[in-house]
Amino acid sequence: MSHNLAGICWDRGFQVYVGDVLAVPLRENTFDVCLCIAVIHHMSTLVSTQPVLGQLIKLIKTSN
């Protein structure tokens, strides 16, 4: 988890969240964009990547 990068973003006025991508405690269908920096390439296999992508996709708003 990059607390330093989150601090830089926070200092620049952005809303940021630092957490575990495998257990995201945020409401689904909430965000316009989900920016995931330096995470996916750390997953060891495609099988371990799929749940992560599923978690992130659930956060993004569906069309009205």
Image: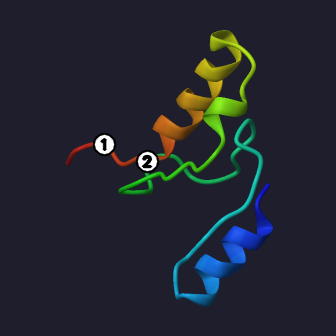
Residue at left offset 75%, top offset 40%: 23
Disc 1 versus disc 2: distance between alpha carbons?
6 Å
Q: Between 41 and 61, which is closer to the camera in this rendering?
A: 41
Label 1–label 2 contact, CB within 8 A: yes
Residue name at image x 52 percent, y 80 percent: 14
Q: Is residue 34 left or right of residue 3?
A: left
The residue pinned by badge 2 equals 29
Report which quarter residue 62 is drawn in. Answer: top left
Residue topped by disc 1: 62
Disc 1 crowd rating (10 Å Cα; few below 14, some 14-19, many 20+) is few
As drawn, the residue found furthest toward the left would be: 64
User: For the residue labelled by badge 1, is the local secondary structure a helix, a strand or a loop?
Assistant: loop
Q: Nearer the viewer, residue 41 or 19?
A: 41
Say which amino acid is labelled 2.
Asn
Q: Nearer the viewer, residue 13 or 60?
A: 13
Asked if 36 appears above or below 44 in the picture, the reply is: below
